[in-house]
Structures are given as structure tokens and as C-alpha cells.
Image (cartoon, helix red, strand yellow):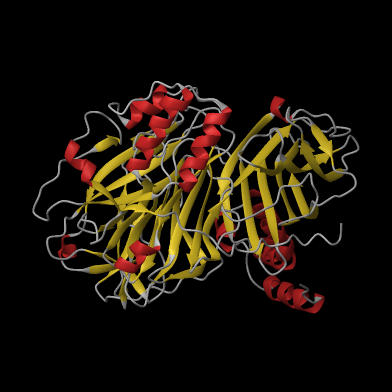
Amino acid sequence: MGISHELVNQCLTYITSERNIQLKTLRLLLIINIIMFSPIIILFYFHFNQIQGSPQELRESNLTFQTALDVDNHFRLFWTVDYETQSVTLEVRCILDRMYDWFAIGFSDYGSIGNSDLCILWTDRKHKIHFQDIHTDNNSFVFTDDESNDCRLLNVRRKAKLLRYAFHRDFDTCDPNDYIIEEGTTHIVYATGRGPISRVDGIRLIDHKHGFQRVQLLKLLEVLPKLASNTKMVDFVNSEVNVPDVETTYWCRRHALPPELKNKHHVIQYEAVIQEGNEALVHHMELFHCEVSGDQELPEWNGACFAPEKPKILENCKRVIAAWAMGAGAGLPIGGNNYSLYVMLEIHYNNVELKNDWIDSSGIRLYYTDKLRQHDAGVLEIGLEYTDKNSIPPHQQSFQLSGYCTSECTRASLPPYGITIFASQLHTHLTGARVWTQHLRGGVELPEVNRDNHYSQHFQEIRKLKHPVNVFPGDVLINTCDYQTIGRTNITLGGFAISDEMCVNYIHYYPKSNLEVCKSSVDTQYLRSYFEYMREREGQSTSANASVKQNYLSIEWNPNRALFLDRFYHSSPLSMQCNQSSGDRFPGYWNGIPVPEIHFPLKTSKRNCSKT
């Protein structure tokens, strides 16, 4: 930006004709210098704030999504997804302990730094920057992928201990040492250590500062619709909860809905309200409606969800209020005649560092309107019935159970024009490793509803589907869970306790029907025959007079008995819960239902690895 010498001389001539010559001259020279050098000042300010990651810059970043990697927010990840090129662009912004420290970030199946795939940025002793594709073995020792470097550095900036760099990664590199980025949960792993260094081969990452964060990397790219002027907002948040110094805490607080919701409204969107700095602490949140009479008063509660002193009547607060951005076609009904105005906020805190000074006031924000959408939305439970009839032997690397929503049930309960699923929440307890939901029509397998091959019970989200699924009367939905019980010494029973197991998909759909639960278990008569067989043929201490739990616990499990149980589950008839919103079953006989068969399986998509 230039200013002519003539203009400067004219200004100086004018000033010398006035009093206070020196003062005015200095002022004018200061103004001229600011004008002349302002681009440099602005550029320096912009560069510094880019490295620091100012709040304004974070809001305007081209990268769509972001998450804190560590509890202190020293390491932060930003990313955007390109589904056309099947690739992801990631940006790391971190505050290192020392200027030339190295930083590695990548992926692993369930968050272990061993057997992981990473990209590492490091500086040699001549202060030259290197960016390499590496992987680790079971003991977390680093090996470089010299033949195929699939970590493509885009840019890097550093100022003292502040480091920022961006890189590019394909979903599937076709390298056997590389992680395949896919739908569902992705475990992001990181490690950092002292630099400069001369090479990275042989570094043992577990000996350095490391950690992981769970994200849904392949998120839905969408622009949320602009909210109408008549939309109202209400927050349900905690108030300065002193989070216990244990790894996992479920904290519940009873709230009241606004009085105006005595009349029917639609929830059309929700969002998390997370206290700044606590992003890594708050793992997931849910808001439950209390299914009691509209005139019944409920006691206050603000404490651990499973505390023995929690009032028993609050166990009625279990119907998920799933609020989301879903356009103009449907809304979750809330309020109305005899509708209870009580809800329960449940927050899962993941305090991995066992800190005792976490204070949190996070929660959920609902947007609602009295201008009702075309359809009411609903939530339908599919999968396995909550019963010990569905149980898992110990010492299993992989054991699958499937829960069915059969054609008999959908034919009896769904409207003639069917329903549209637009969101899904998969759910198991501690031993669940993979979960997926299949869709059948006339024995033909259609595209899956949802899948998570790296499932974690600590990261259960309501995920909007990229492609809504139409389900018609007579269709079948199969929810399958793959469990790992290597460390357990006896059978894991199906049930409600966290040490028991579940296999459920809470599907969110419209228009709302009267079908509330569509779940299965093995038929009771066939299970009795199984226990009789185990007594007569296998010499086990099972008995016709014992309970299901007692019979399962009495079996001495070995690989052959576990395999036999697996085959028994997948071939025995079903007992169905085809339940209405009132809790009553739809008319029909729901025992001895045959297991649905897949006559034409879905073709497996082939990897595009022709380049290799």
C-alpha cells in the first residue's frame, strides 16, 4: 500500500504553518506509518492467530468438524470429508511441551496405540521437517511404511511450541498396514515425544504421552434448515456438577418442561450445550421423558443415575426424547393431553485421567414449535428382548446374537404406506464390539440401515442416516451384535444391568405408528429342550426346575458347547415382542415364529485396489 512523497510533503508544509509543529508532525508520521505498514501488521496478526486457533478463526474454519483429543485441549483435530473422492482432510493444532517435539496421529480399531496406523510429523537435528506414514506392532513399536506413503502433508506452520499442520488421507489406501476409514465409530489415536530426533523407526509409543478420542469421522454433510421465527428454545443443563474422579459416571438431573407444552408441539432440532473446555469429558447425553400421568408430581433428583437412593418412580423416565434437525416433513411430538412435563437429563462423563476438579454445566438444547409438521416422528426399539434367554458364553473372541423384527410383526403393525427411518442409535453394553442392522424384503437383502464395526458403549450417538430407509409392512429388520467375552469366566446374561448384555437399535422414523417394540428372543419351549439336551447328552447340571439364569450358570463352557449354543440360537424359532405404545402386544400368536431367511444376500462392495 503506497503513499506519494508529494502528498507527504504537502501534509508536512501544512503542519509547519501551525503551532505545535513537532507534536503534529509526529502524529502525522505515525498515521502514515500505520497506513503504510498496516498490511504487515494485519498479516502478522492473522498468522499468529492461525497458529493459536482463535475462537473467531475456529468458527470460520473451512474444516467442517472438530474435536478435542485430550482433556486439557492442548491437541485438537479438525476435519472435512469428500465423499466423491473417498478421502478426508485432517488438520492438527497442538501446543507441544517443546518446540521441536514430534506428534503422531492416526487410527486403531478400539483406541489402542499398539497395532495402530499413524502419520507422524517430526524434526531432525538440522531442523528439517519430516512427515511419514507409520504403523505400530502389538507392543507399539514404530515401523515406517517406506514403500507406500499414504500420509500426504498439505501445509505446516510452527511458532515456538504452537504447531499446526494439515494432511490428506484416502478412506481406503489398499495398504495392508493402513486402517480403512469407514462408517460408524473411528478411534483417533495420538502420541507425542521429545524432539528433535534422527529417525522414528523403533520408537515405542506407549512409553510417550499418548491417548485416543472417539469420533464419527464420516459424518453427514448437510446444511441445517434456517429456523422459523416462531421456533422456541429451551435448555436442560447441569449446574456445576463436581464430576467424580472415576473413569465412567452417568449423571442424571430431573427437569421440567415449559408449561406451554401442556399443548402439543413438535421438537424440530436439538444440539449439545457443552461447557467450554469440557469437550473431552462429556461423551454423550440423552434426554428422557418421564412416562407418568400429567398431574403426577415427581421428586427432584440431581445425582448419579444408578445411585440406590434415587427415587424409584424416576425409573419411569426412560422414553428417549430424540430431537434433531429433520427439515419440514416431521417433528417429534411433545406435550398434549395428560402429558407429563418432567424429563430427565442423562450425561455420560468419561474422566479418563481420574481428575477430581472437573466442574460441568453441560446439557441439551431443544428447539420446538407449535406450528406442527406434516408428520409426527417416533422411536421404535428393534433387536433382542431384554431377557437372560439371550446369553453369551465366556472366552469368546467373537459371538453373534441377532434380534428380529419379523415380517409377521411389521405386517400387523405398520401403516400400508410404511415408515421412513431417518436416524438410528445402536446400543449394547460392555462386551459389544460390532453392531449392524439388516433390511429384508421378500427374502432379498436390501442396503443396511446402520453399521458400526468399531462400536464402543462409551460413544453411543443418535446418527442421522445419509440415506433414509423405507420400511413397508412385511419387511424384516435384523439387528446383530458381535460380542467379545475373552476376559469373562462365566456366561454373560442378557438383561438390564451394565454387566449383562443388550442388542438394540433405537430407530427414529416418521410417520409415527402404534408400534413401540419389535424384538425377539429364542422360543422358551426350545430353550427348555436345549437345557434338557445339555443334561442328558453333555452331563451338565441343568434342570427343568431351575431358572434360565441358573441353568446357564451351571454349564461348564468349552469351545464345542459355545459353538453348539451359537448354532442353536441361529436355527431355533423365536418368541416375539410385537408391542403397541400401550405395552400390549398386537393381536396374534407370537411364539414359535420361524427365523427369517435371507435368500438373496446383499452383494459385498469390492475395494478399488486396482492400483496395487
The residue drawn where x is 78% and y is 54% is 173
Q: Is residue 326 visible?
A: yes
On screen, residue 202 above or below 341 = above
Position of residue 280 measured from the top left corner of the image (x, y, whole percent): 51, 41
Q: Quadrant of the C terminus?
A: bottom right
Whether residue 583 sits left or right of residue 520 in the image: it is left
The residue drawn where x is 26% and y is 38% is 302
Position of residue 346 measured from the top left corner of the image (x, y, whole percent): 33, 44
Position of residue 149 measured from the top left corner of the image (x, y, whole percent): 85, 50
Q: Quadrant of the N terminus?
A: bottom right
Whether residue 114 sits left or right of residue 544 in the image: it is right
Whether residue 400 sits left or right of residue 299 in the image: it is right
Whether residue 492 sits left or right of residue 94 in the image: it is left
Taking depth in this image into account, of 360 and 292 the one nearest to the observer is 292
Taking depth in this image into account, of 369 and 338 the one nearest to the observer is 338
Q: How many marks?
A: 0
Quadrant location of residue 15?
Answer: bottom right
Position of residue 453 measured from the top left corner of the image (x, y, whole percent): 59, 48
Q: Farthest front residue?
A: 536
On screen, residue 32 above or below 289 = below
Taking depth in this image into account, of 28 and 210 the one nearest to the observer is 210
Q: Is residue 485 visible?
A: no
On screen, residue 501 above or below 420 = above
The residue drawn where x is 48% and y is 25% is 538
